[in-house]
Amino acid sequence: MKRLLFLALFSGICISLIYWNSLVEDKKELPVINPVDVSEEMVDPELVRLGYGHKIGHFSFLDQDSVTFSDVQLKGKVYVAEYFFTTCKTICPKMNGQMCRVQEAFAKEKNFEILSFTVDPDNDRPHQLKNYAIMHKANRAQWHFLTGSKEKLYELARKSFFVLKPAEAINQGDVGSDFIHTNNFVLVDRQKRIRGYYDGTSPSDVDRLIADAKLLLQE
């Protein structure tokens, strides 16, 4: 009898350990992306030697309601960033259609934000962004369409988000440049670190972004 009880107890412990190990193995850990992890052509020459410790830099722009929005307002929050322009007829509508899905997934999450930086500030003034935001049913408390100095917008893209090749920065604002049509969504954690890049035109990639963002919110 004692032997049977021992075997039953032993089997129970083994099953519990197997289950616990499977949970640990299944737990996904997102990488922290630094300049060393990004194609060198995407990194500003000043940052190429910075292998680790990269964080999104300070920024301050006007949102769709002509109200100043800065990185200070993102303290302790997870967010996704993109670059687009309102008159784009190719990939931007697809990207922001997918971004609507992201907004819906985190509609009740106060610690998650969406940032849409324009690459065409000469045309994308706050009132233009406002109309675009209304068209996409954007919640102003969570989804911010940002415009401002072209130089600052492109500098942020080059030196913080790594979505603009430095060589292409010479064109600043040329709607024919490849940068204008970047399809990257960039996921940033509470510590201002990049944790993932996603194809904003791909539903499956955006599914992955949503899942990864939920992981970051639990960290």
Image: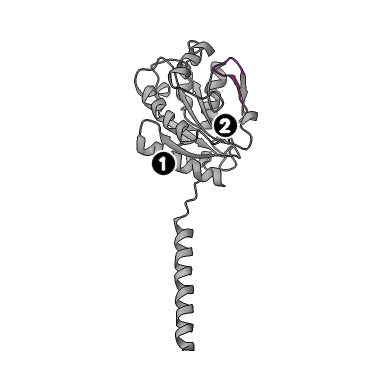
Which residue is the site of mark 1?
208
Observer able to see residue 141: yes
Quadrant hosting residue 203: top left
Horizontally, is 103 left or right of 149 in the view? left
Residue at figure coordinates x 49%, y 16% from the top left: 129
Report x, y in % for residue 97. 39, 26
For discs 2 and 1, the disc positioned in front in the rendered view? 1
Query: Is residue 41 shown to the viewer in this render?
Result: no
Per the rendered image, the range of residues in magenta is 58-67
Quickly name the residue at label 2.
Answer: 46
For label 2, the crowd category at 10 Å Cα-Cα, with few meaning under 14, some 14 to 19 and many 20 or more, is few
Q: Amino acid at mark 2?
A: Glu
Is residue 64 shown in magenta? yes
Say above or below: 121 vs 218. above
Is 55 left, or right, of 187 in this rendering?
right
Image position, residue 84 (x, y; %): 44, 22
Q: Measure the C-alpha gap from mark 2 to mark 1.
A: 31 Å
Describe the element under mark 1 as helix, strand or loop.
helix
**Can you say whether 82 is above or below 29 in the image?**
above
Number of callouts: 2
Q: Position of residue 39 (x, y in %)?
A: 45, 37
Which amino acid, by three-letter code, is at mark 1? Arg
Q: Nearer the viewer, residue 105 or 67?
A: 105
Q: Nearest the camera: 156 or 184?
A: 184
The majority secondary structure of the magenta stretch comes to loop
